[in-house]
Image (spheres, rainbow, N blue to C red):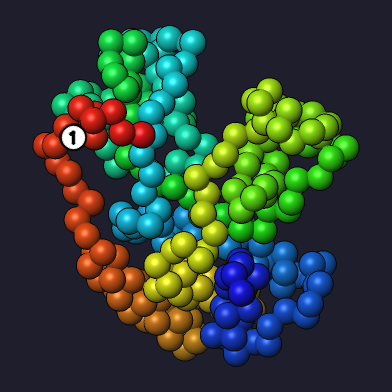
Amino acid sequence: MSITYTNVYDDALLKIGNPPLDSGDVTSDLYVWLTQLYPRAVRQVLFDYQWGCQMRREILTQDTVTPAFGFDYRYALPYDCLRVLKMYPEGYTYSIENQYLMTDLDNTDLDPGVGVLYIANLGTISAAPAWVTLTVYEVGDFVTVSAVTYRCDTAHTAGTWATDLAALKWSATSYRNLDTCNPLLVEAITCKLAYMLTYKVVQSANRRQETIQEYEWCLMRAKQTDAMMGSWDDEGSTEWVDGGRT
């Protein structure tokens, strides 16, 4: 069975001595707190390390708007970009501002273009529903088709999937569900969520100390196992650019 964010909710509750949520309980204060705290817990854990399972490489599209000053070009970052690790090709000055990469580098002079290595966010996308015809979709909605999660780029009423996809109303995302993560990373997120819940649910200094210690231990173990999966640092290498990899 796939791991979902609701499994993380239940495991976090158990860590602070609370029973899991009742099936279908989406109106209680506890559920609301969980849905508010979970994205924050994920972001904080992902910011804490360069997780290999959340690294993505992508060529960027040059924006039509020219920065007012300081740089000649700007590029929109992927919508799931949480933290930029490197810009490719290397050796050029850049700045990350409001989900844009600013640089003097023009991608029309490059093959394959300006790219980034980044840490992708991990939200509740594992729960994306299946695509349904005759359904009104808004920009930012997610659906799952053939085990791939897609994001709505153009608001529309669903017709035929192949037609809507060809019309660029949907784009495949790099969001992955929790099954693809380092299991100890998932456990670290669970521990972080449990720690946050102690302020709302338990309000116990001792329990809060216990949960933060468990989080720190689990985070250390997760980093160790992630590091053993191979070296990601290709500092000084231009193979990725020279080979035209995406």
- Residue drawn at the location 17% of the way across and 44% of the way down: 234
Asked whether, in this view, residue 105 is left or right of residue 19, the answer is: left
Residue 236 locus on image (x, y percent): 11, 37
Which residue was labeled with disc 1? 239
- Residue drawn at the location 48% of the way across and 50% of the way down: 121
Asked whether, in this view, residue 63 is left or right of residue 221, the answer is: right
- What amino acid is found at the position of numbered circle 1 in the picture? Glu
Task: Answer above or below: position of 29 versus 158.
Answer: below
Residue 16 locus on image (x, y percent): 56, 85
Outermost residue, right direction? Answer: 134
Q: Residues within 10 Å of mark 1 (few under 14, many from 20)?
A: few
The reply to whether residue 96 is in sight is no
- Residue drawn at the location 36% of the way across and 39% of the way down: 57
- Residue drawn at the location 44% of the way across and 21% of the way down: 61
The reply to whether residue 111 is in sight is yes
> Which residue is nearer to you in this view: 98 or 145?
145
Q: Quadrant of residue 60?
A: top left
**Kind of element beneath mark 1:** helix
Q: Quadrant of the N terminus?
A: bottom right
Outermost residue, left direction? Answer: 236
Residue 14 locus on image (x, y percent): 59, 86
> Which residue is nearer to you in this view: 3 or 35?
3
Q: Quadrant of residue 49?
A: bottom left
Total marks placed: 1
Q: Quadrant of the C terminus?
A: top left
Residue 51 locus on image (x, y percent): 34, 57
